[in-house]
Image (cartoon, rainbow, N blue to C red):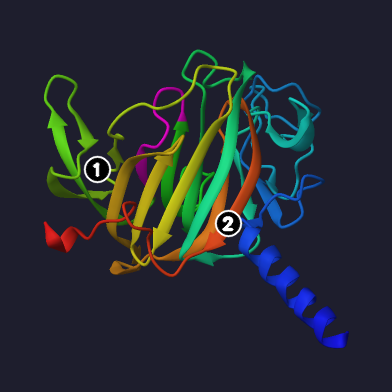
C-alpha cells in the first residue's frame, strides 16, 4: 500500500509540473515583487504636491511614492489586472533580475489619456534587460531594451539609453523608417539610431486584450504579438563607461506614459534555448 501511495504521489507531482505554465509575476492580489518610480508630474495633474512660482511641479515623485495611485490592482473584465493610469510618466519594476526566459502577458488599452500625450497615440512599453539607476534616461527609464506597446506599433524595438542591438531590416524610403525583415541587412541600432519597427501589425482593435511575448536567450531576443513573431534582435550589448559588455539579463519595467492601460496574466518561464522556429542565428546569414 505504501508503494502504491508513493507511486501515486510521484505521478501527481509529475503531472503538476508538466502542466505548470510559467511562474506568475503578478499574483492577482497586489504588487508584491514590484516597485515603482515616478517622474515629475505634468503641470496639468491635479494634486496638492508642491509647485514652483510658475505653477509647475519641480520634483520627481521618485521611488515607491505613488501618491496618485498611478499603479493599482483592479478587476477588469471579471479578472484581476494591473491598472496603469498613465497620469504621470513612470515605471513599475520587478525587484529581481531575470535571464534566459519567456515572458508572457496580456494588455488592453483604457480610455483616458493625459498630457503631454493627450493628443497622441496611446503609449506604454515593456522594457527588459533593465540595469542601472531608475530615472537615468529622460528622468524616467532605466537603461534597457524596449518592446514597444503603442497603438499600431506593438512589438517595435527601442534602445533605451546607451546600448546596441543588431536587427536585420529593410529601409522604407517613403517613410524614412526601418522595418524588421529576417532576410534584410543586419544593422546596429544604438541610442542615436534607436528605433526599429516590427514586420507587421497584429494588434487587436481597441478594447480587446492582446498577448505580448518576449523570448530572450543570451544576447538574442524575439518579440511576439498575439502569437506572431514580429521582430528578432541579436547581439545585445550595453555601454559601461564607454565599454560595450553583453546585455543578457536585468529587471523588467512596465511603463506609464500618458495613457490608461491594463496588464494581466503576467508570467515568466526560464528557458535553456530559444524554441525551434522562434529564434534564428544571425551568423548563418
At a point 23% along the width and 34% down the height, the residue shown is: 179
Along the viewing direction, whichever of 207 and 129 lies nearer the viewer: 207
Q: Please give left or right for residue 102 compared with residue 224 in the image.
A: right
Q: Check the picture and name the quadrant holding the C terminus.
A: bottom left
Where is mark 1, residue-wise? 193
At a point 19% along the width and 45% down the height, the residue shown is: 182
Instruction: Give the percent coordinates (x, y) of residue 184.
Output: 13, 42
Q: Residue furthest right?
A: 1
- Decide: few, some or many residues near mark 1? Use Cα within 10 Å; few <14, some 14-19, many ≥20: few
Observer able to see residue 68 = no
At a point 81% along the width and 28% down the height, the residue shown is: 48
Whether residue 79 is situated above or below residue 243 in the rendered picture: above
Where is mark 2, residue-wise? 268
Indicate the quadrant where residue 178 lies.
top left
Circle 2 sits in a helix, a strand or a loop, which is it?
strand
Instruction: Give the percent coordinates (x, y) of residue 97.
Output: 56, 65
Tell whether position 156 is magenta. Answer: yes
Indicate the quadrant where residue 192 lies.
top left
Q: What stretch is highlighted in magenta?
A: 150-160
Tell whether position 92 is magenta. Answer: no
Instruction: Give the percent coordinates (x, y) of residue 259.
Output: 59, 24
At a point 54% along the width and 47% down the height, the residue shown is: 104
Observer able to see residue 130 = yes
Q: Please give left or right for residue 16 compared with residue 195 in the image.
A: right
Amino acid at each position: 500500500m505504501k508503494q502504491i501511495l508513493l507511486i501515486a504521489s510521484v505521478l501527481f507531482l509529475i503531472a503538476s509540473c508538466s502542466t505548470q505554465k510559467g511562474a506568475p509575476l503578478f499574483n492577482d492580489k497586489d504588487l508584491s515583487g514590484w516597485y515603482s518610480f515616478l517622474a515629475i508630474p505634468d503641470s496639468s495633474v491635479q494634486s496638492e504636491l508642491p509647485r514652483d512660482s510658475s505653477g509647475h511641479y519641480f520634483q520627481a515623485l521618485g521611488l515607491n511614492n505613488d501618491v496618485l495611485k498611478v499603479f493599482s490592482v483592479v478587476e477588469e473584465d471579471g479578472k484581476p489586472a494591473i491598472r496603469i493610469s498613465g497620469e504621470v510618466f513612470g515605471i513599475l519594476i520587478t525587484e529581481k533580475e531575470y535571464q534566459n526566459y519567456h515572458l508572457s502577458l496580456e494588455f488592453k488599452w483604457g480610455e483616458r489619456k493625459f498630457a503631454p500625450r493627450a493628443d497622441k497615440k496611446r503609449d506604454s512599453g515593456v522594457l527588459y534587460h533593465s540595469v542601472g539607476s531608475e530615472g537615468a534616461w529622460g528622468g524616467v527609464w532605466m537603461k534597457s531594451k524596449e518592446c514597444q506597446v503603442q497603438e499600431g506599433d506593438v512589438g517595435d524595438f527601442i534602445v533605451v539609453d546607451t546600448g546596441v542591438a543588431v536587427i536585420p531590416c529593410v529601409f522604407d524610403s517613403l517613410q524614412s523608417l526601418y522595418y524588421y525583415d529576417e532576410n534584410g541587412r543586419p544593422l546596429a541600432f544604438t541610442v542615436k539610431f534607436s528605433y526599429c519597427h516590427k514586420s507587421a501589425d497584429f494588434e487587436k482593435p481597441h478594447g480587446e486584450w492582446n498577448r505580448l511575448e518576449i523570448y530572450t536567450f543570451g544576447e538574442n531576443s524575439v518579440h511576439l504579438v498575439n502569437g506572431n513573431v514580429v521582430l528578432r534582435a541579436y547581439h545585445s550589448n550595453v555601454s559601461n563607461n564607454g565599454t560595450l559588455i553583453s546585455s543578457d539579463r536585468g529587471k523588467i519595467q512596465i511603463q506609464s506614459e500618458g495613457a490608461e492601460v491594463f496588464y494581466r496574466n503576467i508570467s515568466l518561464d526560464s528557458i535553456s534555448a530559444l524554441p525551434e522556429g522562434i529564434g534564428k542565428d544571425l551568423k548563418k546569414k
